[in-house]
Image: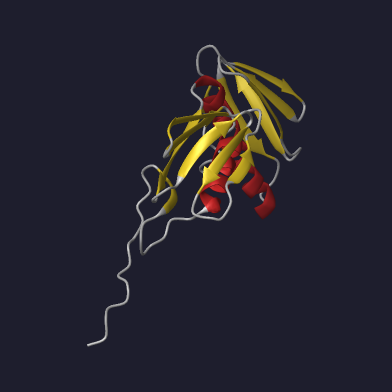
């Protein structure tokens, strides 16, 4: 039994949901998202509630059931509230700057790293060591934040690197001098 797939989703105020066969379109204050789901899953929209129903009890259908429900829920949250990821850069000389539709990261390499910002996202750099990524699509926000973090992962020894704001880095003890 998929608990996530059986969950009934409530449509927030100021959000419209359109259903056309295997495609659901969600419009809200922040934008519009579209998702095409598998024909084995049936989506029912009634009285500002969304239900997902699976066609059979096969394992892959059960997996699609929960995934479809979660994706629709993420769309509802995205168009009403939006998603936001905050990133910190720690290290001497490490910083970020916006250059048009690209972000330039200086993270201890011999050259700066340029990363193109997707059109769906809004990226702000309030301080050279802080980056805020916001958008309506949870996947795109998370993927861009992960790509930024991948430029210089945080070191467990020195604590330097690019990390999420509330991320806890387990610090390791370095080598001790021989006695």
Instruction: Please determine whether, in this image, residue 6 is positioned above or below residue 149.
Output: above
Q: Nearer the viewer, residue 79 or 36?
A: 79
Q: Residue at x 54, y 11 (%)?
A: 14
Instruction: Please determine whether, in this image, residue 154 is positioned above or below residue 44.
Output: below
| Left or right, 94 with reference to 110 | left
Q: Nearer the viewer, residue 7 or 137?
A: 137
Q: Residue at x 56, y 22 (%)?
A: 79
| Left or right, 132 with reference to 102 | left
| Left or right, 87 with reference to 22 | left
Quadrant assignment, res 115: top right
* Extreme-top residue of the structure: 14
Horizontal and vertical percent position of residue 147 = 58, 47
Q: Nearer the viewer, residue 42 or 148?
A: 148
**In which quadrant is the C terminus drawn?**
bottom left
Residue 127 shows in this picture: yes
Residue 2 shows in this picture: no
Horizontal and vertical percent position of residue 125 = 47, 31
Horizontal and vertical percent position of residue 127 = 41, 33
* Extreme-left residue of the structure: 179
Horizontal and vertical percent position of residue 83 = 50, 30
Q: Nearer the viewer, residue 99 or 142?
A: 99
Q: Residue at x 58, y 37 (%)?
A: 103
* Extreme-bottom residue of the structure: 179
Count of all numbered marks drawn on residues in the image: 0
């Amino acid at each position: 039994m998929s608990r996530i797939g059986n969950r009934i989703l409530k449509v927030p105020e100021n959000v419209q949901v359109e259903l056309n066969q295997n495609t659901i379109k969600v419009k809200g204050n922040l934008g519009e998202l579209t998702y095409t789901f598998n024909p084995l899953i049936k989506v029912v929209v009634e009285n500002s509630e969304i239900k997902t129903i699976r066609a059979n009890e096969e394992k892959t259908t059960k997996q699609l059931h929960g995934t479809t429900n979660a994706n629709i829920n993420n769309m509802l949250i995205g168009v009403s509230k939006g998603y936001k990821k905050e990133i910190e850069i720690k290290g001497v000389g490490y910083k970020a700057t916006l250059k048009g539709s690209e972000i330039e990261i200086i993270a201890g390499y011999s050259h700066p790293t340029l990363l193109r910002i997707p059109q769906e996202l809004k990226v702000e750099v309030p301080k050279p060591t802080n980056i805020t990524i916001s958008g309506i699509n949870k996947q795109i926000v998370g993927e861009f934040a992960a790509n930024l973090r991948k430029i210089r992962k945080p070191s467990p020894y020195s604590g330097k690197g690019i990390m999420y704001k509330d991320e806890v880095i387990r610090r390791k003890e370095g080598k001790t001098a021989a006695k």
